Amino acid sequence: MKRTDRKSSCPINFALEIFGDAWSLLILRDVALFGKHTFKEFLSSEERITTSVLTDRLVRLEERGILRREPHLTDRRSSAYVLTEKGLDLIPALLDLMEWGTSHDPASAGHRKEAFLDKLRSERGPLVQEMKEKVRLGGAVLV
Amino acid sequence: MKRTDRKSSCPINFALEIFGDAWSLLILRDVALFGKHTFKEFLSSEERITTSVLTDRLVRLEERGILRREPHLTDRRSSAYVLTEKGLDLIPALLDLMEWGTSHDPASAGHRKEAFLDKLRSERGPLVQEMKEKVRLGGAVLV
């Protein structure tokens, strides 16, 4: 993004201009939390992103240095999207959204998630580092 | 929001369906971080939200229980928007966005902000509680 296009110099606005829309954040959730890496895997998520929105967001997130496209290890016709270091730094914000959603959604359950959130509340610093390292090495927060 | 409208049962999606767009998050930033509370104050922010988008987002955020509208203390023709408890619980996510933006925006500076972020990294739990209490009582994180 060209500097001159920015609406303000606020760091929160800076972040939101890069990934501040629901579809971008759902793609980043898919990569970081669920270990999804391919176009087909993103398309199959429950929220049913359309191919055109998905294409648009993947291009933006790659251009803005949040995702990196790599050749797929087993399917040569496919690409795998992984988080860059800048993208890995988004994991805390994703965990906060998960914590907020879990706390305020009356329909939210899942003991595994609750245990994870308890740990997040009590040992946030080390847990965030552990999660970043796990995702950096090809894993995912929740799998 | 009716439960049946939801695109998925994921807690992150739950959160994003409520406030997952840049303008909503900028309004929440204005309230929590800058202590802005009125339509006029939100309109005057550097990002230049339009009156129609602002009206739409304030209605949504109030309907979804994130903001509460109160009579303005000094201007009877005006309303003041304050964060509900559900809205106060968003402060950690806003702080994460601020941290991310400050870390990755080459144009970002400001020693006061840096000192604040250092404190956030080292004493996150107590600091978040302190910030929530400050905003709950009518203050703001950064003022």
Image (cartoon, coloured by chain):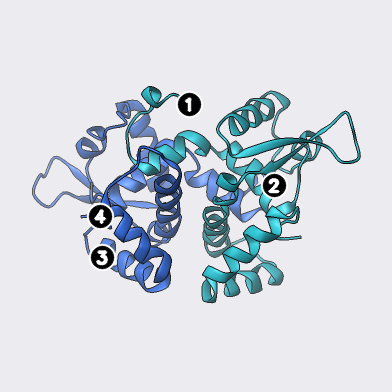
Chain colours: A cyan, B blue
Q: How many numbered markers are drawn? A: 4
Query: Are the two marked residues, 1 and 4, in contact with CB atoms closer than 8 angstroms?
Result: no
Q: Identify the residue at horizontal 32%, vertical 29% (top origin).
A: B49
Give the camera-side residue of A111 and A95: A95
Q: Position of residue B29 (x, y in %)?
A: 34, 47
User: Could you give the CA–CA distance between mark 3 and mark 1, rounded to whole angstroms?
Assistant: 35 Å
Name the residue nearer the viewer: B46 or B101. Answer: B101
**Residue B47 rendering spot, x and y as whole percentages:** 32, 31
Q: Chain of mark 4?
A: B
Q: Chain of mark 1?
A: A
Residue placed under numbered mark 3 in the picture: B134
In this figure, which residue is indicated by the disc labeled 2?
A30
- Disc number at residue A1? 1
Q: CA distance from mark 3 to mark 4?
A: 18 Å
Element carrying mark 2 = helix
Task: Measure how far apart labels 4 and 2 are at the Cα level.
Answer: 35 Å
Q: Residue at 31% of width from left, 64% of height from top? A: B131
Mark 3 against mark 2, which lies toward the viewer? 2
Crowd around label 3: few <14 · some 14–19 · many ≥20 (10 Å): some
Mark 4 highlights which residue? B112
Task: Report the amino acid beneath label 4.
Answer: Arg
Count residues near mark 2 (Cα–Cα under 10 Å), then give few for <14, some for 14-19, many for 20+.
some
Q: Crowdedness of circle 4 by 10 Å Cα count: few (<14), some, many (20+)?
A: few
The residue sitting at the bottom extreme is: A122
Query: Foreground residue, A128 or A19?
Result: A128
Determine if residue A107 is in view.
yes
The residue mark sitting in front, 3 or 1, is 1
Instruction: Give the residue furthest to the left.
Output: B74
**Type of the residue with mark 2:** Asp
Asked if both marks, 3 and 4, belong to the same chain, the answer given is yes
